[in-house]
Amino acid sequence: MDLSGRWHALVADEELRRTWLDDDVDEAGWEPIEVPGHWRSTPAFATSDGPLLHRVRFAHERPGPDKRTWLVLDGCFYQGDVWLDGGYVGDTEGYFFPHAFEVTEALAARTEHTLGIDLTCRPPGDRTAQHNLTGTFQSGVALDPDWNPGGVWRPVRIERSGPVRIRHLRVVCREATTERAVVGVRAVLDAGRAGAVTVRTTVAGVDAEEVHTLAAGENQISWSVAVSDPDLWWPHALGAQPLHDVVVEVRTLAPDGGDEDEDGDPTGARPARLSDRRVRRTGLRAVDLQSWIASVNSERLFLKGADHGPTRMALAEPTGEEVRGDVALAVDAGLDLLRVHAHIARPELYQAADEAGLLLWQDMPLQRGYARSVRKQAVRQAREAVDLLAHHPSVAIWCGHDEPMALRVDPETGDPVASAPRRIAAQQLPTWNRAVLDRSIKRSLQRHDGTRPVIAHSGVVPHPPLLDGTDSHLFFGWSHGDERRLPGFARLLPRMVRFVSALGAQAVPETDDFLEPERWPELDWDHLARAHGLQRAAFDRHVPPGDHDTFHGWKAATQRYQALVVRRQVEELRRLKYRPTGGVAVLALADAHPAVSFALLDHRRVPKEAWSALRAACRPVIVVADRLPAVVAPGDPLALDVHVVSDRREPIAGVEAEVRATWAGDHHTWRFTGDVEADACVRVGTVSMVVPDAPGPLELELRLADGDGGAVADNVDRTVIARRPDGPSDPGDGVAPPR
């Protein structure tokens, strides 16, 4: 029975809490509120931080003999106390997983009922010592920091079972080869009385049946099902995505003889009756991560990805089609990976990723600093995340904590508010968040799953004692100086580019009405910084508003700059494929609310210019040369390596790379031919030249054709030739023959 729909709510106070569950409460003074939903979507609570009292009346028939009833709350932000007919049912903490309570006695006592939820979602206050495990919803810079996600955001329902209920179910693919796959299942069975049960499992045409003797109460059982000659699940770049239903049924012996079982089979005096049933859809595949290089079913794969926040800031409100649309956009852009950034998303995202063959890096909902009191709850929620998501073949990587530095963040810049020595110390010295909390979360994920790589935390630089570090967040061209510094940084510190899980620059979106462009240049910069994420200081460094007479001119410049940073840096990291880089993820795919952000699609999914740049940088085959300097002078020698990067699973024979340099009044062309191995990066040649004495633009155009002359890839780079005060250093014709 689904209890979703119109409920009633009021802001809680101590006097109201004494009477709010009485049967004769007059709800005329209460505010109608929709469940599922967030209380701030109701005008009466649009600025409220709660707590809120939610109540609903419903009728339900009394459960029959040997039947049990359960109240299931699929998702509540963030902590709640649940009451039924004035009796306390239990408490909830954790927004992303269901909470279930047995209510058989309460529903047997009467047919008219009142359900109440006293729900709170406290604002974080000190963001260096947070208590709510809500991740990006309350600690990220991508959403409005004044937003409160509180509410019953997922359905509430009454479920029925027989004497034994499957209280928890976990399904993982423990092994997958072309010869055999092994599906591991763990269940917690809640038995109303001691006795024997039959547990039947069906997966990919294989049936397995076991008999277990249960004690009254909770019983933990585990088992495996082997599938011969499995049809393997692959990422979309490597193959197809067959999915299989894992069906688990628990059957009990009827207390009285002579009745038919639920399939109508009159055999036996004490037939087995279906007590509970669960279905999980999964794919058979094995995933690994060695030295930050991923493999699926033993096939190596360079991961091209994007970070992804919630589809909307109000997580309850997007339709399934909207959520699935984000997955389709990612695949269409040539991405292999979405990082579900600092939150756990709606179920539709994981279903769509399974079907599309899109891998997911799944963060736990932790970002920045947390109080010591959260450790036990964080470990519990890691187990709940495994139960909720482990059967999805798309979920490839677990990550415990994003940027676990307990530093305050400036809403203007998005950077930690601390001196440089303190920021360095936060990365290098031991901290409770990194050393205790994150290790505890990692152990919990490894213990309860064990089939996927687990990263304790993201964005942590190498530090004692191992000097290893994790993935990197590198914002050259935004908060880390010039965008051209990435290649030199990679040569100097190759360990820092093994996996870059965040890069990019902000840009003004196409849907810009919230910026009030008619006020240019007197925008409400402070409001845009706080509520919409705009980082004014970084814009002043890279795309100064003062350099533009019109808002639209500035907007276009921000988009051009973002596109340049995204394309060049993704291409550079792809050129380091497997030596040492295993993947890259841009920040971010799309906005969850109106924002001036790193996202490449705005909150209405209108693309910025960088969207096309990302698509170009993520093509299966690209041709790329060393970057031209920002400015060159006549007589400067240039030697630019040209590489072809291929993600294709088969070699490309007889390719021809053509490089054409063009300047005022002249040009020169180089051609290189050869073969490109499968899944490889190959240096095809070096362009050597002396900059001509021809002030003005210098353009380098690259084209790649296959053995039949068909176009495969293209690229272009530009610089400016400017004379030095003392004239050119070499008065020759400016062109040296190709090496």
Image (tube, rainbow, N blue to C red):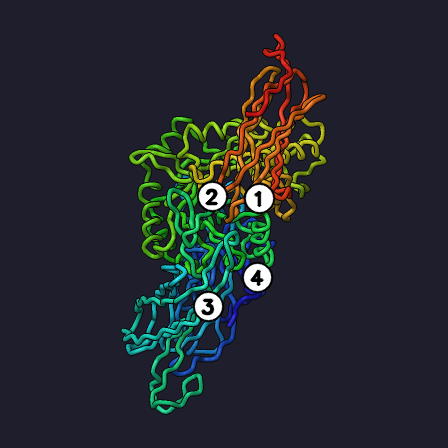
Viewer-nearest residue: 444 or 631 = 631
Q: For mark 4, does the 10 Å Cα neighbourhood hold few (<14), some (14 to 19), or many (20 or more) residues?
A: some
- Of the 4 image quadrants, the one containing the C terminus is top right
Camera-near label (1 vs 2) is 1
Q: Is residue 138 visible?
A: no
Mark positioned earlier in the residue sequence (1 or 4): 4
Q: CA distance from mark 2 to mark 3?
A: 37 Å
Label 1 sits on residue: 619
Q: Which mark is residue 34?
A: 4
User: Outermost residue, top direction?
Assistant: 726
Horizontal side of 594 relative to 549 (left or right) equals left
Mark positioned earlier in the residue sequence (4 or 2): 4
Mark positioned earlier in the residue sequence (1 or 2): 2
Q: CA distance from mark 4 to mark 3?
A: 33 Å
Camera-near label (4 vs 3) is 3
558 lies above or below 390: above
Q: For the residue marked with disc 3, what is the amino acid? A: Asp
Label 3 sits on residue: 245
Q: For the residue marked with disc 4, what is the amino acid? A: Glu
